[in-house]
Amino acid sequence: MAKDHSEVLTVVFTDIVGYTRTTAQLSREEFSQLHDIFDQISLPLFQTYEGTVIKKIGDAFLITFKSPTQAVLCGVALQKAFREHNKTSKRPIRIRVAIHTGEVIVRKDDVYGEAVNTASRIEDIATPGHVVFSEAVFGAMNKREVAYMHLGMKHLKGMKYPIRLFRVKTAYDDYIRAVNRVKTIVTTLLVLGLVASLVYLVVQYIILQPGFLG
């Protein structure tokens, strides 16, 4: 029997968003199909990125990685795979991915400890379609391989101190950034146009004053 031991690992939780509401409307066959699709998409990617599946709890997978970078890249691949699936599916599956790195207690093919609890709390606040990770992951991963954005300090349920979080940037983020840039340019042009109009009116008013031209 393997002895219990501590090890620094990257812990990943991923689950189906709106699972309870969705499954309440499914037959037993449809319920099985949902899980089959979730498993068929997820499990090969866990293996590709060298993750170890610890367990599946309802609709949530708990996976560990030795490499924080591989964990984040796996999260990116998962989101991409489910987006592709959803393009042609009548019943889309939206997932969220939460990642934290820290020391865990490995016991009988399971993991315990603060790192696991923290990853679970990050999962609670992660939004659909996103890969959210902690500062510990950010500090250890290869930042050249992942485009990311800073979410700031967040208070997580049951945790005494706030934790700094990040998430993987998406194409939608780039779209919003471009839209905001256009809005800024348009606003600037409108302000300049307004200022120019006011200057013109003031000049015209001065010119039309009696005695201005002698």
Image: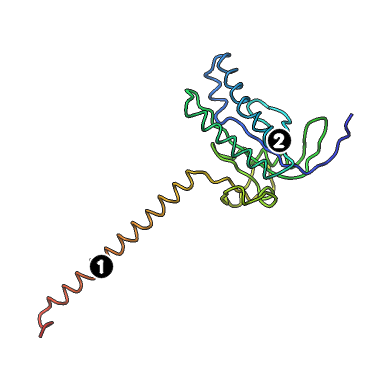
**Residue at x-position 40% and y-position 50%:** 179
**Does residue 89 appear left or right of residue 77 in this picture?**
left
Disc 2 target residue: 51
Residue 165 percent location from the top left of the image: 62, 48
Residue 173 percent location from the top left of the image: 49, 46
Q: Earlier in the sequence, mark 2 or mark 1?
A: 2
Disc 1 target residue: 196
Residue 137 percent location from the top left of the image: 68, 47
**Residue at x-position 66% and y-position 50%:** 142
Report if the CB atoms under discs 2 and 1 are less than 8 Å apart: no
**Residue type beneath disc 2:** Gly
Relative to 29, does residue 19 appear above or below in the rendering? below
What is the number of callouts on the image?
2
Q: Nearer the viewer, residue 25 or 111?
A: 111
Q: Quadrant of the C terminus?
A: bottom left
Q: Helix, strand, or loop for circle 2?
A: loop
Q: Helix, strand, or loop for circle 1?
A: helix
**Residue at x-position 60% and y-position 43%:** 132
Whether residue 162 appears in this view of the structure is no
Relative to 157, does residue 36 appear above or below in the rendering? above
Mark 2 neighbour class, 10 Å CA radius: few under 14, some 14 to 19, many 20 or more: many
Mark 1 neighbour class, 10 Å CA radius: few under 14, some 14 to 19, many 20 or more: few
User: Marks 2/1: CA distance?
Assistant: 61 Å
Image quadrant assignment for residue 46? top right
**Does residue 139 appear left or right of residue 85 in this picture?**
right
Whether residue 167 appears in this view of the structure is yes
**Residue at x-position 31% and y-position 62%:** 191
**Residue type beneath disc 1:** Ala
